[in-house]
Image (cartoon, rainbow, N blue to C red):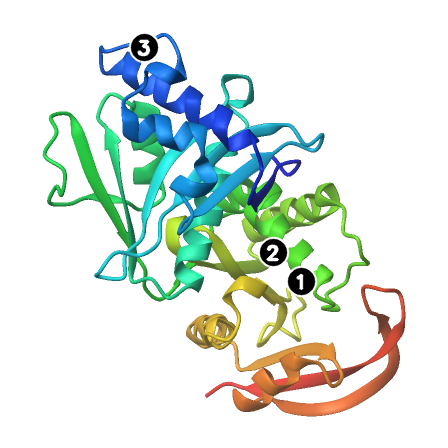
Amino acid sequence: MNTDLRVREVLGDPRPSGLLAAYHLGTEAEKGVPVDSPAALPAPYRVEVENPGAAFAADVVLLAEDEGGTAAGLVVLTSPGDDGVPEIKRLWVEPAARGRGVATALMHEALRRAEAAGAPAVRLSVWMWREHAVRLYVGLGFTTVEPWDDRPGLLCMELPFGPAVVERLAPEEIRTHAAAGLAGLLADAVDGGASIGFLAPLDPAEAAAWWHTVAAEAEQGARDVWAAYGPGRRLYGAITLIRTKKANGRHRGEIARLVVHRDARGKGLGARLLATAETAAAEAGLTLLVLDTETDSPAERLYLKAGWTPAGVIPDYAADPAGTLRPTTLYYKQLA
């Protein structure tokens, strides 16, 4: 995904009008009923173009901008229906901005907002001939459902929300996600004040390079990585388990870089990731785990609740993201 993109909700911004006009003109041409101008569009579409603020007053209009503030695309997340399920509509990316991850960024933000609002699912409809869009939706986890619109050539799709899925990442998967999701997790943690070995602001290239190093360690059997995926396969969290190759330490491992995105906190995901790593360590024959974390940080509550034992505090052990030296508490857990 292009890290120079910004996706935000727009209210009273005139740019959606032009993007919606391009969307509807393109759609009418694809349907074989081209029109020469927005003024010739069917009335419902013309209203959207002429006054998007009124047409989508109850909905969320998301605009993607490049670093220069140029509009690259938009999507609409409607207000929930009677069953509590919102719909994604009007996904459009300007031709000059295609191939840069704009559609994916817009979809991720729309899904994030829908899930955060407590929606049980999200639905959409797409014309079958829009093969790129169909592939995008399938890749995000949407599946075809019983149609609510019987127009020929229209697919109706839905993505249900549920608990995040925790999966172990192979080295190539770590590399694939390094520059986008995984780097973003580190950046979000550092921006949120977590002391995880980096100073703020964290350069995306530095974060991605660190994950590439982790991928190499995974290939060597020195580190295991698990990731938590939310709706649309968005990365919500990660944890790593470091193994030692020292002859006298092969019984132990170290938990490192447990991170959960701020959008996904408060749902027990950190505990799930930690339990996943602990179970894998025990199954691999490890009998002792260690970790360190900033003293009095929120993470300490998680570790204490999970049965970890504090071994001691080291003053001024590591700098927080702002560069201030902080104490660190060492923890251990013996595995059955």
Q: Residue at x 62, y 37 (%)?
A: 5
Q: Residue at x 11, y 45 (%)?
A: 146
Instruction: State which quarter of the image contains the N terminus.
Output: top right
Q: Secondary structure at mark 1?
A: helix
Query: What amino acid is labelled 3 in the image?
Result: Val
Q: In the rendered view, does 294 fall on the left or right side of 269?
A: right
Q: Nearer the viewer, residue 234 or 329?
A: 234
Query: What amino acid is labelled 2 in the image?
Result: Leu
Residue underneath mark 3: 35
Label 1 – label 2 distance at C-alpha? 6 Å
Q: Nearer the viewer, residue 103 or 201?
A: 103
Q: Residues within 10 Å of mark 2 (few under 14, many from 20)?
A: many
Contact, CB < 8 Å: mark 3 with mark 1?
Answer: no
Mark 3 or mark 2, which is nearer the start of the sequence?
3
Mark 1 or mark 3, which is nearer the start of the sequence?
3
Instruction: State which quarter of the image contains the C terminus.
Output: bottom left
Residue underneath mark 1: 189
Contact, CB < 8 Å: mark 1 with mark 2?
Answer: yes
Label 2 – label 3 distance at C-alpha? 45 Å
Q: Estimate the x, y position of residue 104 in percent, counting from the top left.
A: 46, 38
Residue 295 seen from this side: yes
Camera-side mark, 2 or 3: 3
Q: Estimate the x, y position of residue 89 in percent, counting from the top left.
A: 34, 38
